Image (cartoon, coloured by chain):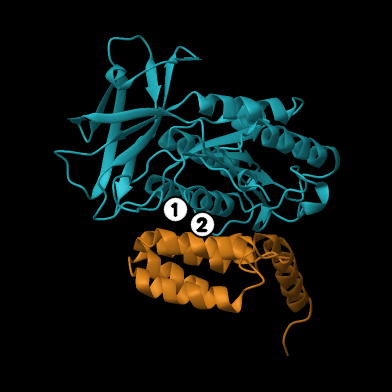
């Protein structure tokens, strides 16, 4: 959620807000790198190049073991579409076969 | 660890002058600009050029060139895709290539190596070489995020900086192509994306692949570098070495912009005076 809020703020040119949101995201998700990258990029947009470099150096030195959970959102959860449609069809077919009383 | 065994990046534009400015940073006190250029006659680099051989325009206004020097000492940054698609023989090939590049650097250089998959990590060398055990392999590929991070790391040095990036296909980045390009306009790094199996990627109808490739080509163009295609059956080491050798043939031009607004986008145009050939340099730079 922080990542999304930060993105909205950055897109609207509210870089201070973006840095604040992304900073919280980076703090919450220290096992992943998206928050850190997003934070550093907002700092670049803010004109804080050196702070952005320091931020990147900090997270590039850490061992990251998990893929970012936001990845599923970015991909639109399209891998869920087919099984979901199949399940809905199944449910619909079942309802037709057994009408509500 | 020797200082040259850090990340290497090539800087194209640098704030210079009597003030202690950091590389790639433009501030109100910026008094100069550094441009990294490659002069070519056809595909052959031209050597022995001096400031009298170049004509430079900043936003259309002719500028006086203050100095022309070489790129003998550079910050070389190498970013390697070590995602799940790079295993076994491909990984071995990658490590060999990286070590060839390490051997091609000089003590005057600073070398920084990074490996990226779903995240990015700086890599330490052991006895002057990259070891398979130091590579965090596996996972998806956050190429654009890695590009952004590499640009930031690369621009953190007073030496001219070059980024050599072995590309894969992006599957997991937070940042967009536009955000990476915008960052490239703000820092002083020349990018050489190395694209394995370029012909196949170029001929694909997959929209995401074509878009990713177009963005890499734009990045190379905007930073004054070049997208380097490599066939999948060719060794990578000579390619890496050739890129560094090409970088060594570049010139570093410095000038203090006059007659133009400091802030905003600056279009750069560099040409040869009285000589046949072309000049390859970054498209411009952004002062926020």
What residue does disc 2 label? Answer: B175
Q: Where does residue B118 sit, x and y in percent of width and height?
A: 67, 57
* Chain in cyan (letter): B
Instruction: Confirm whether residue A1 shows in the render.
Output: no
The answer to which of A51 and B17 lies nearer the viewer is B17
Please give the name of the residue rendered at 77% of the width and 35% of the height, measured from the top-left corner.
B96
Q: Chain of mark 1?
A: B
Q: Where does residue B174 sit, x and y in percent of width and height?
A: 55, 60
Q: Are marks 2 and 1 in contact (CB under 8 Å)?
A: yes
Determine the colour of chain A: orange
Q: Chain of mark 2?
A: B
The answer to which of A80 and B168 lies nearer the viewer is B168
Dot label at residue A7: none
Left or right? Give the position of A3 relative to B50. Answer: right
Please give the name of the residue rendered at 62% of the width and 54% of the height, measured from the top-left corner.
B142
Label 2 vs label 1: CA separation? Answer: 6 Å
What residue does disc 1 label? Answer: B179
SS of the residue at dot 2? loop
Left or right? Give the position of B179 relative to A60. Answer: left
- Position of the C terminus of chain B, as image quadrant, is bottom left
Number of residues whose C-alpha sits closer than 10 Å to that of mark 2, classed few (under 14), some (14–19) or many (20 or more)? many
Please give the name of the residue rendered at 44% of the width and 64% of the height, measured from the top-left corner.
A51
Please give the name of the residue rendered at 28% of the width and 48% of the height, measured from the top-left corner.
B18
Q: Where does residue B274 sit, x and y in percent of width and height?
A: 28, 10
Q: Where does residue A63 sit, x and y in percent of width and height?
A: 71, 65
SS of the residue at dot 1? helix
The tally of labels here is 2
């Amino acid at each position: 959620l922080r990542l999304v809020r930060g993105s909205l703020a950055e897109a609207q040119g509210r870089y201070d807000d973006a840095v604040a949101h992304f900073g919280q995201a980076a703090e919450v998700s220290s096992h992943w790198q998206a928050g850190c990258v997003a934070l550093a990029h907002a700092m670049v947009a803010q004109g804080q190049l050196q702070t952005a470099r320091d931020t990147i150096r900090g997270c590039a030195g850490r061992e990251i073991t998990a893929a970012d959970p936001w990845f599923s959102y970015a991909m639109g959860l399209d891998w869920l579409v087919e099984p979901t449609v199949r399940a809905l069809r199944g449910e619909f077919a079942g309802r037709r076969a057994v009408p509500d009383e | 660890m020797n200082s040259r065994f850090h990340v290497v990046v090539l800087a194209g534009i640098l704030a210079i002058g009597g003030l202690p400015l950091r590389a790639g940073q433009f501030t109100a006190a910026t008094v100069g600009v550094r441009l990294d250029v490659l002069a070519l006659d056809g595909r052959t680099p031209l050597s022995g050029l001096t400031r009298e051989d170049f004509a430079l325009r900043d936003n259309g206004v002719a500028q006086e060139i203050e100095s022309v020097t070489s790129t003998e000492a550079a910050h070389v940054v190498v970013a390697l895709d070590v995602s799940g698609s790079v295993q076994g023989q491909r990984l071995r090939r990658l490590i060999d290539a990286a070590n060839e590049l390490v051997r091609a650097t000089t003590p005057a250089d600073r070398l920084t190596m990074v490996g990226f998959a779903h995240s990015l990590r700086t890599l330490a060398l052991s006895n002057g070489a990259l070891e398979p055990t130091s590579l965090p392999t596996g996972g998806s590929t956050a190429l654009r995020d890695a590009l952004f991070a590499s640009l930031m790391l690369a621009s953190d040095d007073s030496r001219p900086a070059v980024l050599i990036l072995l590309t894969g296909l992006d599957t997991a980045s937070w940042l967009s192509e536009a955000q990476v390009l915008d960052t490239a306009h703000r820092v002083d790094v020349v990018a050489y994306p190395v694209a394995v199996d370029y012909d196949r990627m170029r001929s694909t109808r997959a929209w995401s692949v074509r878009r990713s490739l177009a963005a890499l080509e734009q990045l190379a163009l905007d930073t004054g570098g070049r997208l380097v295609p490599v066939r999948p059956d060719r060794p990578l080491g000579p390619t890496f070495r050739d890129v560094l050798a090409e970088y060594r043939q570049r010139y570093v031009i410095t000038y203090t912009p006059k007659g133009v607004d400091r802030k905003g986008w600056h279009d750069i145009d560099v040409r040869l005076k009285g000589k046949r050939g072309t000049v390859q340099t970054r498209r411009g730079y952004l002062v926020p």
